[in-house]
Amino acid sequence: MLFPPPQKTATDRRVVITGAGIITALGVGWNINAEGFRAGTTAFRPVTLFDVSRQRAKIAAEIDLPAGLPSTRLSPNKLARLNRATRMLLLAAHEAWAQSGWQRDGPLGVVLGTTSGEMTLGQDYLRQALAAPHDFKHQATRVAYYQVQRPALVLGEAFDFQGPIINISNACASGANAIGHAFELVRGGRAERVLTGGYDALCQLTFAGFDSLQALAPTPCRPFDAQRNGLTLGEGAAVLTLETLASAQARGAEMLGEIIGYGAATDIHHLTQPHPEGRAALAAMNAACAVAGIAPGEVDYVNAHGTATPQNDATEAAAINRWAGDRAPQLPVSSTKAGIGHLLGAAGAVEAVVCLMAMRGQWLPPERALTTPDPVCRFQLVREPVAAKVEVALSNSFGFGGANASLIFRRWS
Amino acid sequence: MSAVFIHGIGAVSPAGWGVAALRAAVANNVPLPVHRLARPGWKNQLPVRPVPPPLARLEFLAHPRMRRAGVLSQHTAAAALEALGPDAALVQTGARRLGVIVCTLAGSVTYTRRFYEEVLQAPATASPLIFPETVFNAPASHLAACLNSAAINYTLVGDDGSFLQGLALAADWLAQGRVDGCVVVGAEELDWIAADAARRFRRSSVYAGGAGALYLKASPDARVELAAITDSFTYTNSSSRAEAARRVRAQLGPGAPDELLCASGADCSAWDDWSGARVTPASILGGALNASTAWQCVVACDEICNGRFPGGWVSVSGANQQAIGARFVKGHAENSKA
């Protein structure tokens, strides 16, 4: 029963990550992405997925999707119906699933974050409905696969499990909120394991939307640069397998890291603009630290939301400065959006995997395009590839509507 | 276990603005008139049940955030504020921490369609005022802004059953002490593209719009208590859907003949042997996904509140994701709103 809940365990349970899958414009899978993030590789190029000739911005971090999909229980017919976002999600989930060593074993919950789902199918539906009002060919399939719950159902079919599905759509914090909610389900005794993550594919509507707001940069984004001129969109997916420490130890599973904190808060200042002091960002970071039982001084690296819009970065910098206090001048911070763009609902999930990579490899992901750090940043912006001791990492994700979320990870050793 | 009580209900439906209009329509038990909605390129129009205009100017529309807010946001705010009642003022002054959960499937579909039509015509001049309103969590954000509430705020996107998942999440937040109260809204918007899409699966469907809301707190001075929410039983085809509905029924138990079943209308066989009273709000109001589920819950709570039934059961077989159910029972207080 979802309510009343099962009796809460005496102490909060530790939550570990035993599988991680990732796909970004840097490539498919952990290794190529780790290599790219460690080196500070950038993956921007002219948009080819749709017409941007009449837009101000013309670049994004597009993914070269592989022609084939991994072998799962999905039939060729089903596979053929999957669109871009679901294909990305499936690729990431397959990597996470394989790495975790999970087998079908009772109900398994899925918590995903996305902003747009399969919006390209919605676009196709509308175009056909307007251009050929009496032609219904493919329209039912488009509706079925457009709906946000469908990709999660596809994962269940692919890996032969069933369980409750939660889709959180809190704009660009969706991926972080999804992982945070999954963390709370496992930590609070609601589930032994949860499959979680975020995904979003580039689509014309979203691209034109950010362009209409003049939020897109015509050149590759430069988070926290004094001359930054906007964000660059990307696409991708990341999936994590979360389970209790006891469950992972009983299976002899390899632990990629531990989630120790999650905080969320709402910025009610404006639908698209953060409060200048970053109050909700600060509240989210503080709340995550409180759950983790750590002080900001114990955090070794912050993966910032860092979209490279003038407002976000100034606000986030102010919040990090206040949150870190005296530690700020020594605190390494970077935004990996400098390499792969803003992945919207996937951002929080992909950046969670980047934190795991940094902790596993003991390095910090640099922003190599940064030329003049914004003087508002009192912290250390990581500009070159560097080895570092990273035991604890914090990841920020903020979104339209004032959705603010922070996650804290600890290295498993 | 932490008990959870329903401290307020709110509704915006094809019957009108407010629970009273919904109550009257359900009591009348006659399907509301079907309206015709123009569908571009068609001679025939789409059968729908829209929300009628409000009888008076709604006060909350004066909030700066609501100036451009779409219909979905307006319905969300109206239902939530009705459910919150006098507690809205306590939230606004910071005396109450309020969680907000908005559940939807189609989201702000009118603005989304309109914005994409502008993009197709001339992307360079597509409106920057509309785009942010297309985001799924815009209604939840506007509601939080109207209430001056900076506490946790989620938008859940999924089929009709998501509203009950939202209630369970609210109960968790209350049990964890993260919030003092939580308002859960199920909301959907009527637009020709959504009605057109719904007809791809059920030609007889009459699409509707609106919202329903429940206000949950842990304090027992309420006339309705949340007794149970079943697991969410997912399915991928019609046979497993029927099985999922049966599992919901099994988990909720046999029920008592003096209790009320508020059904979604898509799960009849699992409830064939139900001996008590039964109402299917969607058959009167039209189908509106998460708003429909919210109306089922509002009706169940309202009937308990009015003393007509000691318990109310809600059964949902969603569009294509899950079957899930809930049960409400009589609470302890006599003078509370719900």
Image (cartoon, coloured by chain):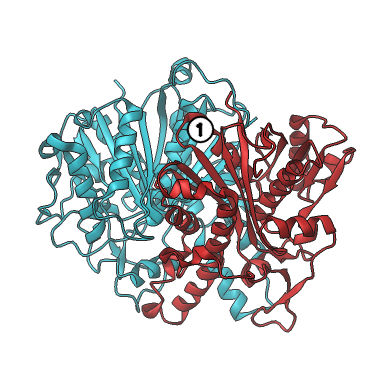
Residue A220, compared with residue A248, is above or below; it is below
Of the 4 image quadrants, the one containing the C terminus of chain A is top left
What colour do you see for chain A?
Answer: cyan
Residue B332, compared with residue A223, is above or below; it is above
Compared across the picture, whether A19 is left or right of B1 comes to: left
Q: Where is residue A182 in the image (x, y as percent from the top left)?
A: 47, 35
Residue A285 visible in the current orientation: yes
Q: Residue at x 36, y 51 (%)?
A: A267
Compared across the picture, whether B92 is left or right of A1 comes to: left
Q: Which residue is drawn at 78% across and 41% down?
A: B307
Q: Would you name the residue on which mark 1 appears?
A: A194
Q: Where is residue A79 in the image (x, y as percent from the top left)?
A: 58, 51
What chain letter is assigned to the residue under label 1?
A: A
Residue A359, compared with residue B130, is above or below; it is above
Foreground: B312 or B169? B312
Q: How crowded is mark 1: few (under 14 residues within 10 Å), some or many (20 or more)?
A: many
Residue A344 visible in the current orientation: no
Foreground: B72 or A255? B72
Which of the 4 quarters of the picture holds residue A38? top left
* Amino acid type for the residue under numbered disc 1: Val
Q: Residue at x 83, y 30 (%)?
A: B254
Compared across the picture, whether A47 is left or right of B175 comes to: left
Residue A92, compared with residue B135, is above or below; it is above
What colour do you see for chain B?
Answer: red
